[in-house]
Image: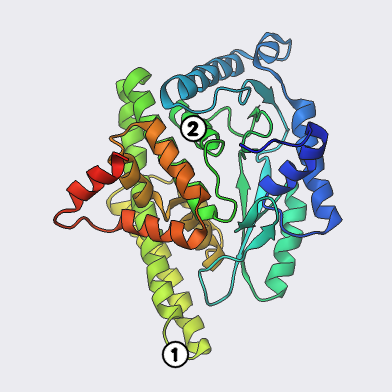
Amino acid sequence: MPSRPPRTVAAALAAATLLAAGCSAPSYYLQAIGGQLELWREARPVEEVASGAGSTPELRGKLARAQAIRDYASRELGLPANGSYRKYADLGRPYVVWNVFAAPRLSIEPKQWCFPVAGCVSYRGYFALADAEALAAELRAQGYDVHVGGVPAYSTLGWFDDPLLNTFIHYPEPELARLIFHELAHQVAYAGDDTEFNESFATVVELEGVERWLAAVGSAEQRAQFREAQARRQDFLALVTGTRARLEALYGSEILPREMEREKARILAGLGEDYRRLKAEKWNGYAGYDRWFGQEINNATLASIGLYTALVPAFRALLAQEGGELGRFYARVEELAAMPKPARDERLAALAAPARPGDVADASADGAR
């Protein structure tokens, strides 16, 4: 690993980089640095928070469970054993940052912001909602579809110790574990020019981690609830993926842009209808995704979902090749992260391809390297 600059120098780099920097505007860097400094100011050791006068029994219980999950992450999942999630900060707001996604009116391909340390990333983050909305307004005026999404946590990739936050500490235990495992995975491997790679890898680690954690220490009720939540999540992703595929086919066709816009509106309206049908016929009225479907859904909204899931099948296949051994899996992912993006994309596409006769033997030989 290359040597890192001193903390005071790295602060600017990390804050700007990990919030999807890319523009050289001084105001963007200043808000990024200011937001990171706020986290440092507010973060206090978990033991100090738990014993403090303002602590509640509920918060103490949540902090204790978070520490148990954190211990499990390093002990059983091979995730970094450092000071991340050993402190707690209450920021007094529902999200730590708000990410802005943009895509052309007739494309699902997200707009990229490029930065010399982080590479090119597919969103741009702000510590204040008003700042995110200001950029969103500018992008809409330029003709983009835009989505602004609140984010409960982000990773500084091991440059600094990330704290537990009020934005997620009250999550149900399986969801809290998902988030901690996901963010720690970003400290294991990171490709500086590939948001889909980074987020899909972390998603596979979180899912594998939660399954193992629940098997080891979870209750039967938690395991059942997690399986049910996963089934709904898969149904949701199937809806979104199907809509993306229909839109991508539309945007690749040769019809006139005006007709394309009308068909786009029809496809997006159909997504809402499909959700209402799914909710009534399969989910027994479960309303947990109502908020997502209640917002404006456009190309940028759909692109923001795809960034977290597009390469999950490839990473799952890679984990299977390594027999579920996480240490070897992480090493393979680090090798992929170091590749040029075209070569990495080719390797991941091969991993995600359906198996053919003879592939099992080939995969076994590949995993034994």
Residue kind at label 1, given as amino acid type: Ile
* Picture coordinates of residue 307, whole percent (x, y): 50, 55
**Which quarter of the image is occupied by the C terminus?**
top left
* Picture coordinates of residue 133, whole percent (x, y): 72, 58
Q: Element at badge 2?
A: helix
> Of 80 and 212, which appears nearest the observer?
80
The residue under the point 32% across, 23% down is: 215
* Picture coordinates of residue 251, whole percent (x, y): 46, 79
**Mark 2 or mark 1, which is nearer to you?**
2
Residue kind at label 2, given as amino acid type: Phe
> Of 10 and 44, which appears nearest the observer?
10
User: What is the spatial separation of the Cα atoms under label 2 and label 1, in whole angstroms?
Assistant: 45 Å
For label 1, count other residues whose C-alpha is less than 10 Å away and answer few (under 14), some (14-19) or many (20+). few
> Of 150 and 109, which appears nearest the observer?
109
* Picture coordinates of residue 190, whole percent (x, y): 55, 45
The residue under label 1 is 255
* Residue 131 found in image quarter: bottom right
The residue under the point 50% across, 30% down is: 176
Left or right of 236 on screen, residue 164: right
Residue at the far left in the pictured view: 357
The residue under the point 70% across, 55% down is: 116
The residue under label 2 is 181
Q: Earlier in the sequence, mark 2 or mark 1?
A: 2
For label 2, count other residues whose C-alpha is less than 10 Å away and answer few (under 14), some (14-19) or many (20+). many
Mark 2–mark 1 CB contact (< 8 Å): no
Left or right of 236 on screen, residue 170: right
**Which quarter of the image is occupied by the N terminus?**
top right
Residue at the far front in the pictured view: 369
| Residue 36 seen anywhere in this rendered image of the structure | yes
* Residue 355 found in image quarter: bottom left
